[in-house]
Amino acid sequence: MADEMDDRKNRYDERELGREFADPEYAERQQLAQSFEDPNALDDARLGKSFEETNSSGKRRKSPGIRAQPPTNRRNIAIFLVGFLLLFLIVVIAGWLPRHERDKEIDRRAKEQQNAKPVVDVAKVEPAQNQQGLVLPGTTIPLTEAYVYARASGYLKTRLVDIGDRVRKDQLLAVVDAPDLDQQVAQAKQQLMQAERQLDQQRSQLALATVTVQRYRVLVRKGVFSQQDGDQQETNYASQVANVQAAQRNVDAYRANLGHVEALQSYEYVRAPFAGVITQRNVDVGALIAASGVTTGAESAPAPEGQTSTSGGSQQAGQVNTGGSSGASSSAATTTQSPGQGGPLFGLAQNERLRILVSVPEGFLAAIHVGGHAQLTFQEYSGVSFTGEITRTANSVDPNTRTMLTEVQVDNRNGKLVPGMYTVVTFSPAPGIEGPLLVSGDAVVIRHDRPTIAKVVDGKVHLQPVTIGRDLGGVVEILTGLQAGDIIVTNVTDDVVEGAEVQLHFAKTAGQGKS
């Protein structure tokens, strides 16, 4: 019985399959009829068809005689969706929680910094206790320096020396050819000879007048001549004596004039006023020399080393000490062939002993005394110290700079030093003398057009105006406004304002140990 039912079902399926091939719309009508019997049958069929189309094995066509597979279990789809959702939530939570904690930590720190007091670097102001003493810049200048001019007008005939030559006192440097001056000397000699001949003539006439008057005196006493004749001869004699005296004065005048022109003629020979070294030579052979010392074809010579004008002066020499490591500027190396300019013929310096003029601050005057010593250092001789002697001081303080001009001399017979070298002069400190108050240059700011230092009093900032003295590079000297022991801010920032509460961080005082 069961076999008969299976055979009927198979035959029915074969007939249905045949109808589907014979009539393509038959399957759709059958499916529509089944949808009326089972409302969910059409949706189930569509869902199964969609799974077949998206299957990785591709769309499988139904072969004749093979039955279609049932749809994929919807429970597997639900499990996949739930798993994907859980994985997405885990990833989101894992990325959000650390960032949320970090933001909370940043907010906490920001609030702490906002409410916390700013930390500033401070230092205690103390007097400089540098055992090296007072250090000042200076420039070496010759002990004696002069410009050699010519007093005779003419042309340079001979030049015997050049720069760098060592000369003796009264050594011949150059010869000036002055023909007109030579002619003046010759003329003066002839005038003197003429005056001397006139003097001889007057003396001869005086001798005759003397003999005549003596004879008349005897004859008048004997009565040969009258008294009138005797008085006349006495008058002639006195007149002749006066003529002789006048002729003698005339001879003296012409002799003096000859001495004058001969003295000028001697300036044709330019000689060294003292022993030294030729530092400048501003003329060549053939240059026209004027009696005032002006030369055509020579440039105006610069002032001596350490001086700001040709008039010289120790005060001017001391003013070049702040010229930097290169010292005072000099134009000695410039060309000397600019026509129409004036200047000396030669420059001569005595270099066996050099001097340095420095300006000592008023606070260190007690450490400076004549006969004391100072140490000199030069860039050209690294690690070598020269000893100088304090030879003289101005014994007065300049009211403008509050400094005293001091001269230090150093022996240079070995010739290692030359004028114009930059040097650093170190004076030994006087026992028991405190140095000035020095602070870091970063601690000084400008507030209301005045130098100001931030002083900390009871944990609060107070902007204190000060008076600045010397600027020593990294540190500056404070004259007024601070006292030893004050706490100051070494690096003023935007947080350092008047009345601000700050936390102190003590740093090493930049001014300590310096002077």
Image: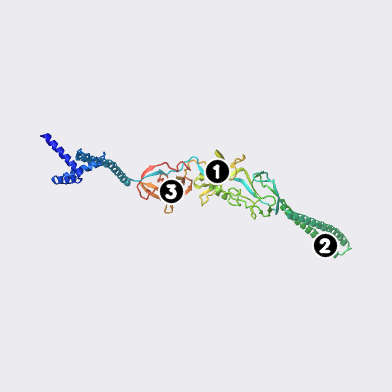
Foreground: 322 or 213?
A: 322
Foreground: 230 or 91?
A: 91
392 relative position to 446: left or right = right
Which residue is painted at 55% across and 43% down in the image? 423
Mark seen at residue 444: 3
Work out whether 239 lies above or below 276.
Answer: below
Give the tally of numbered discs.
3
Question: Alpha carbon of mark 1 to alpha carbon of mark 3: how far?
Answer: 29 Å
Work out whether 423 lies above or below 202.
Answer: above
Q: Residue furthest left?
A: 1
Tell me if residue 39 can be seen: no
**Disc nearer the start of the sequence (1/3):** 1
Mark seen at residue 236: 2
Given the image, on which type of amino acid does mark 2 rest? Asn
Residue 44 rendering spot, x and y as whole percentages: 18, 43
**Disc nearer the start of the sequence (2/1):** 2
Helix, strand or loop at mark 1: strand
Tell me if residue 467 can be seen: yes
What residue would you read off at disc 1?
A: 423
**Disc nearer the start of the sequence (3/2):** 2
Given the image, on which type of amino acid does mark 3 rest? Val
